């Protein structure tokens, strides 16, 4: 029973990290039709920022900025020429991700580095270690901030309008280019924050992002495009399923089980958990 | 008629006659390896270029084919005993899954049927629900990721991270002999040629037109009374079968199969090769696989780290400037020349 309960914080914190990662992906994917494979490298950039600063409190905003600016540069320099060609963006951004990984290898060396966890995060209450609690707290803060941004600010409401219908939003006078830039900035920044969170549960290496990017995309598929609620629920679901599948079977089968579950879920809801209702065909 | 087949005939003569005569055994072996990848690329060209299905999991099918072949080779060498890696990982009895693979007919048919069945199951589940485009790409990529973790985890069954290597003979032929390797090269080149002609025939048939129509307007095709899911599943299965066959040929040619050869990255690399060659033309896919294979060898011989930068950069350049690849550029140039001559 304790072993069973011990999996709970592990699953929840994996879910929390996936949530932070998938928030950015679901909006860039839903709003701009961009499949950003380099998103994983923004996680890695955030983690290395934490490694360089060696200070959790400073690292969070710094990682958000570093990853956000990287996302902004990527969007302005390359991705904006690819809107409406999702499969091409996938290949393009994969090229970018290759370059960034190799860059990290050259800058920080190929072996993994360790970021020492701050003293105030050691220990825990009952089965909940503080570091995993902190990660969950980060995810909750991130989700609430994004939700407030989307519903309470003018820019956020414009973002929602672009997600729902780009042409109509543009004809109503919304500067869709600016909204796209901002979405990319925030989404990439959140990936950076996820990277800082990951330093609390494991070592940092150039390939850090590749371990999470596939799962994060599954979250987007299961949650529905551009859906905040969908990303949150699907991230939690997949995080828990992942940790319990590892617990019940063995680690090598867990990913197969998760993939099978997602495909099974798509049989019931082919568009994911939540769907943007529209009359547009294909 | 003759003019139409001239390019193919020229390439066939070069590949089947000139290359074995001119290339030293080591280079010929490398070319055989690229041609194995070209078979996979042909499948991607069919599924992605003609059918619009971006499959990022061809490595899985390639691997199923490769592991089937490797299991057969390992069992013939063990001569009734246990394969070497099983002894190392402390397995005492041959796993039931392995037993039928001692039969070459079974192993070879599984190399193709295994991928086909998996593709039909996945395709039916996914395409019936009208899951497509990027969703499909992501699911196939997740499949590749899951497959690698599974293979690495089942050490006693699959050889884990190291995979399987140390193959010595195939159907009684010594694999280290130059003559065997030359024979293998000819088989690979022949298979590629036959598959290329068959795929071209398929694309030019009514079925091929339907496939392109599904790519360009799936809903319209559905409204006309066809079943797009069926068309896509059949194509996906065909491309999976090709990848499986390529995997089975790859193992005796290169002498190893391991998870590193079939994960997310190798699967994507092949897609990139197709993009570089030109996804809209089947010959472009084949050309891309050979060119990229050659480039990878040439550059990683010189500077290993630089290759990743170069590959990434090549990727970005091809996608931004020439999304139709080498074949597209060639067509444009040929078109310009023709119109220049006409005026």
Image: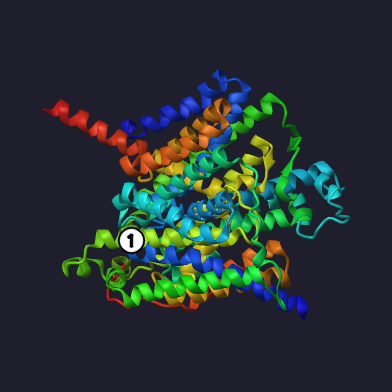
Subunit ID for the residue under disc 1: A
Q: Is residue A235 left or right of residue B337?
A: right
Q: Quadrant of the N terminus of chain B?
A: top left
Give the residue displayed 47% in from the left and 38% down from the top: B311
Location of residue B26 by image quarter? top right
* Residue underneath mark 1: A182
Q: Is residue B28 above or below residue A12?
A: above
Q: Residue furthest left?
A: B343
Residue B261 or residue A95, whichever sits in front: A95
Residue B257 drawn at (x, y percent): 67, 44
Residue at 49% across / 63% down in the picture?
A: A21
Q: Is residue B313 visible?
A: yes
Question: Residue B163, can we see it?
Answer: no
Secondary element under disc 1, as helix, strand or loop, is helix
Q: Tell me the quarter of the picture where residue A211 sits.
A: bottom right
Horizontal and vertical percent for residue A183? 35, 62
Q: Position of residue A231 (x, y in %)?
A: 47, 72
What's the residue at 43%, 63% (across, down)? A24
């Amino acid at each position: 029973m304790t072993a069973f309960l011990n999996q709970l914080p592990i699953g929840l914190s994996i879910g929390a990290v996936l949530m932070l990662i998938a928030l950015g992906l679901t909006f860039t994917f839903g709003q701009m039709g961009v499949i950003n494979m380099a998103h994983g490298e923004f996680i890695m950039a955030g983690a290395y920022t934490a490694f360089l600063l060696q200070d959790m409190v400073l690292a969070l905003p710094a990682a958000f900025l570093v990853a956000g600016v990287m996302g902004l540069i990527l969007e302005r320099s390359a991705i904006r020429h690819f809107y409406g060609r999702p499969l091409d963006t996938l290949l393009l951004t994969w090229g970018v991700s290759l370059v960034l990984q190799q860059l990290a290898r050259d800058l920080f060396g190929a072996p993994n580095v360790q970021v020492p966890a701050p003293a105030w995060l050691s220990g825990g209450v009952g089965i909940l270690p503080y570091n995993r609690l902190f990660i969950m707290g980060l995810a909750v803060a991130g989700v609430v901030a994004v939700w407030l941004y989307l519903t309470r600010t003018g820019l956020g409401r414009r973002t929602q309008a672009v997600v729902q219908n780009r042409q109509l939003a543009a004809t109503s006078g919304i500067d869709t280019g600016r909204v796209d830039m901002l979405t990319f900035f925030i989404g990439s920044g959140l990936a950076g924050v996820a990277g800082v969170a990951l330093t609390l549960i494991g070592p940092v290496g150039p390939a850090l992002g590749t371990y999470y990017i596939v799962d994060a995309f599954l979250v987007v598929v299961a949650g529905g495009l551009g859906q905040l609620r969908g990303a949150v629920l699907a991230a939690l679901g997949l995080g828990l399923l992942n940790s319990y599948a590892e617990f019940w079977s063995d680690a090598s089968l867990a990913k197969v089980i998760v993939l099978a579950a997602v495909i099974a879920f798509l049989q019931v809801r082919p568009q994911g958990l939540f769907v943007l209702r529209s009359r547009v065909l294909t | 008629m003759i003019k139409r087949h001239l390019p193919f005939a020229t390439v066939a003569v070069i590949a089947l006659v000139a290359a074995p005569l001119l290339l030293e055994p080591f280079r010929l072996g490398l070319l055989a390896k690229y041609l194995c990848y070209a078979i996979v690329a042909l499948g991607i060209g069919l599924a992605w270029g003609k059918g619009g299905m971006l499959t990022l999991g061809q490595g899985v099918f390639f691997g199923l084919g490769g592991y089937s072949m490797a299991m057969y080779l390992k069992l013939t060498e063990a001569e009734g005993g246990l394969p070497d890696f099983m002894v190392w990982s402390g397995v005492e009895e041959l796993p039931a899954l392995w037993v039928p693979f001692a039969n070459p007919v079974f192993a070879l048919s599984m190399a193709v049927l295994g991928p086909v069945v998996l593709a039909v199951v996945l395709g039916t589940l996914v395409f019936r629900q009208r899951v497509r485009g990027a969703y499909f790409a992501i699911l196939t990529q997740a499949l590749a990721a899951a497959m690698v973790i599974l293979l690495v985890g089942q050490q006693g069954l699959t050889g884990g991270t190291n995979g399987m290597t140390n193959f010595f003979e195939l159907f009684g032929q010594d694999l280290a002999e130059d003559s065997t390797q030359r024979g293998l090269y000819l088989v690979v080149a022949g298979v590629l040629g036959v598959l290329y002609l068959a795929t071209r025939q398929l694309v030019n048939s009514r079925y091929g037109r339907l496939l392109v129509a599904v790519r360009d307007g799936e809903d319209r095709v559905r409204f006309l009374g066809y079943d797009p899911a069926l068309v896509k599943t059949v194509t996906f299965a065909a491309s999976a079968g090709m990848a499986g066959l390529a995997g089975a040929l790859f193992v005796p040619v290169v002498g190893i199969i391991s998870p590193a050869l079939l994960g997310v990255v190798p699967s994507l690399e092949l897609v990139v090769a197709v993009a570089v060659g030109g996804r809209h033309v089947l010959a472009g896919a084949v050309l891309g696989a050979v060119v990229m294979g050659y480039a990878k060898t040439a550059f990683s011989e010189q500077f290993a780290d630089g290759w990743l930068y170069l590959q990434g950069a090549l990727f970005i350049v091809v996608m931004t400037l020439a999304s139709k690849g080498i074949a597209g550029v060639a067509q444009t140039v040929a078109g310009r020349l023709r119109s220049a001559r006409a005026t």
